[in-house]
Image (spheres, rainbow, N blue to C red):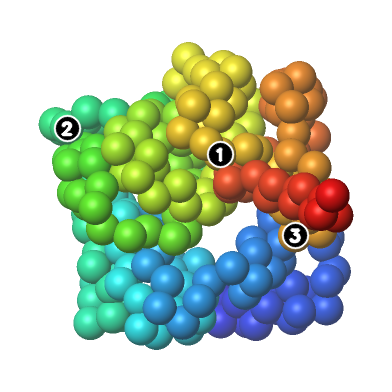
Amino acid sequence: MQKLKIILREMLILLHFDITKNLKYDRLTRKILQQHIQIDSNCIDIGCHKGEILEQMLQLAPKGKHYAFEPIPYLYQHLQEKYGEKAVIYPYALSDKNGTSAFQLVTNAPAYSGLKKRHYDVKNPIIEEIKVEVKTLDNIIHHTEPIHLIKIDVEGGEWDVLKGAKNLLTANQPIIIFEYGKGAGDYYETQPKDIYLFLKEIGLSIYTLSAFINKKAALDIHEFKNYFYSNKEYYFVASKEIKKQNKSRNPS
């Protein structure tokens, strides 16, 4: 049954049948990876889950160095067994500090698991609280190591992950594909302006996935806040803004 679900999902993505928002985001994320990952790009998958995005990173950049983070023990073990020879897999939850923390494992819907208990879009969620080791990305990967693309999906804790990676992000200014939506991010006491201004400070602008693919304008702070509070979009891209070239002047 699980294999059949995976095959059906792949078919829907290939045929552009966006019957859910998540399917649309999966399709657009893959397109961004295909457009921007080079054969030797170094990538990071934070909230790797079963490895769907890591798989794409490995296929597109076989000569790159790749990192993945997944704190759920049985998923980490699966990733280690499947990808351990091709990527560096860590069993940590990433945040803005180092230590240990309670982690809310939604056993009947593990994709919703995270450091904090929140509202879950699943009937009768079964929560098991486990202990996990928490690290900052800056504590694990030195800022001098080139990183080209990062995916972050940690069910609301994205702001803390970004803060804990400031040195690496400032030095590399990578493309960041990240989830940030109401019903998750607000449980971490963050505001859209926090993420917007943080990314702007390190030289990154925010786009919707489709706008980034089609090279449309970046969002201003009011547009980003509106997307968050309306929940119209909850997946975004942060990237260096493409600057328009000045027209060359004719010699006088």
Q: Earlier in the sequence, mark 1 or mark 2?
A: 2
- Whether residue 88 sits left or right of residue 62 in the image: it is left
**Alpha-carbon span between mark 1 and mark 2:** 25 Å
- Whether residue 194 sits left or right of residue 23 in the image: it is left
Q: Nearer the viewer, residue 181 or 250?
A: 250
The residue identified by callout 2 is 98
Residue drawn at point x = 64 percent, y = 26 percent: 182
Q: Earlier in the sequence, mark 1 or mark 3?
A: 1
Q: What amino acid is found at the position of numbered circle 3 in the picture?
A: Ile
Whole-percent x, y for residue 30 in the image? 63, 69
Describe the element under mark 2 as helix, strand or loop.
loop
The residue identified by callout 3 is 213
Residue drawn at point x = 48 percent, y = 15 percent: 189
Q: What amino acid is found at the position of numbered circle 1 in the picture?
A: Leu
State the image quarter where residue 188 is shown: top left
Q: Nearer the viewer, residue 149 or 151?
A: 149
Whole-percent x, y for residue 208 in the image? 73, 45
- Whether residue 167 sits left or right of residue 131 in the image: it is right
Q: Nearer the viewer, mark 1 or mark 3?
A: 1
Residue 62 against residue 239 in the figure, above or below? below
Q: Earlier in the sequence, mark 2 or mark 3?
A: 2
Q: Identify the disc placed on residue 204.
A: 1
**Residue 135 appears in the rendering:** yes
